[in-house]
Amino acid sequence: MKSGNVLVMFLVLIFVFSLSPVYGDVLEPGKKNVPIYYELENIDDYPGYVFLLHGNPSPDFQILNSSPFTFYKFSVASIYAVNQSQFNREVLKSMDSNQLDAYFQNDSRVLNSNLKLEAIYDTVSDTNPLENATIKLKVVSLDEDGLEIVKDRVVFGYHDGQTVEESFLDQNTTPAAPTNQEDQYWFYLVPILAAVAILLVLLYRRYR
Amino acid sequence: MFFFTSWVLTVALEALVWYIILKRNALNLVFYSVLINSLTLPLAQFFYLYFLDNLVLMEALVVLVEVPIVYLLLRVTLRQALYLSVLANLVSALVGLIYYSPY
């Protein structure tokens, strides 16, 4: 077979096999989700308020504390604050989903942060060392007029236990996860050394 | 550890494929396999992880990069270099998929 034919067959096979099947909302084989955890760092500075997480389709409501939290991967959630004196957990527990939606959207006692939170940072190859991302949130202002929360920084967690922290420069853009130090040696240093070695072998042969 | 294991596996398998086809000095072939795969494997993994999330396209790119290097280092014809590179990468990719398969 001529080398031109081999090349054409090779390119056709690449095209055929590179067509990815559709997996819907099921995770594609060889992939993993990198979950986002959120942590409301200065929640204890506001003891007079109850902080709630409400999302669509879930959670109905979740009372927040200073611990990291996450939620269902396909949900979009927001943080709300209610004055301690106006909060009744049992009333909320007795509401159905529609009533809860109405409560969080329309009730004047509920302060909305307008921050839309997602549960998944990214879907990556399962060999990717990135395991999770924790976004540290800060309450900037909270009074009868409203609740303002900002994303302060994100802490990326890797499979070997290392963490890397990045600050938010723009509230709408989560910083990209950097590769860790060990990986950088592998990704950059090894290929450079190999390229130099190949060149040396070729030069040695030429000038021997 | 993942990177090191995959590197050892790839170097060994590609050298073995070349040895079966070319019947040349095994040590030399292992040496060239170390050089070539130390160049292409980290770059392929980097691009696969962060940019081009498609194993088949990535293997194709690796073959395209490897062919001229195989041609120069192993002193074979371009056609042989293409055969050697396609076959070696096919074998290492298949074994890698089986080895790292969760099943």
Image: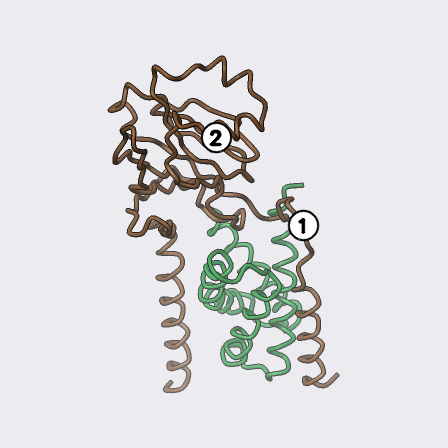
Q: Which residue is mark 2?
A: A54
**Which colour assignment does the render follow?**
by chain
- Residue A133, by quadrant, is top left
Dot 2 crowding, Cα within 10 Å, few <14, some 14–19, many 20+ = many
Quarter placement of the C terminus of chain A? bottom left
* Left or right of residue A23, residue A60 in this image: left
* Left or right of residue A208, residue B88 in this image: right
Q: Residue A140 at what x, y percent from top left?
A: 25, 36
Dot 1 crowding, Cα within 10 Å, few <14, some 14–19, many 20+ = few
The residue nearer to you, when weighing A146 against A9, is A146
Q: Residue A3 at what x, y percent from top left?
A: 68, 84
Q: Are dots 2 and 1 on a single chain?
A: yes
* Left or right of residue A42, residue B82 in this image: right
The chain holding disc 1 is A
Element carrying mark 2: strand
Question: Which amino acid type corresponds to the residue marked 2 in the rendered image?
Answer: His
Q: Which residue is mark 1?
A: A23
| Residue at the top extreme, as displayed | A90
The chain holding disc 2 is A
What chain is colored brown? A
Total numbered circles:
2
Q: Give the residue at x 37% y 36%.
A: A113
Instruction: Indicate the colour of chain B.
Output: green
* Left or right of residue B41, residue A85 in this image: left
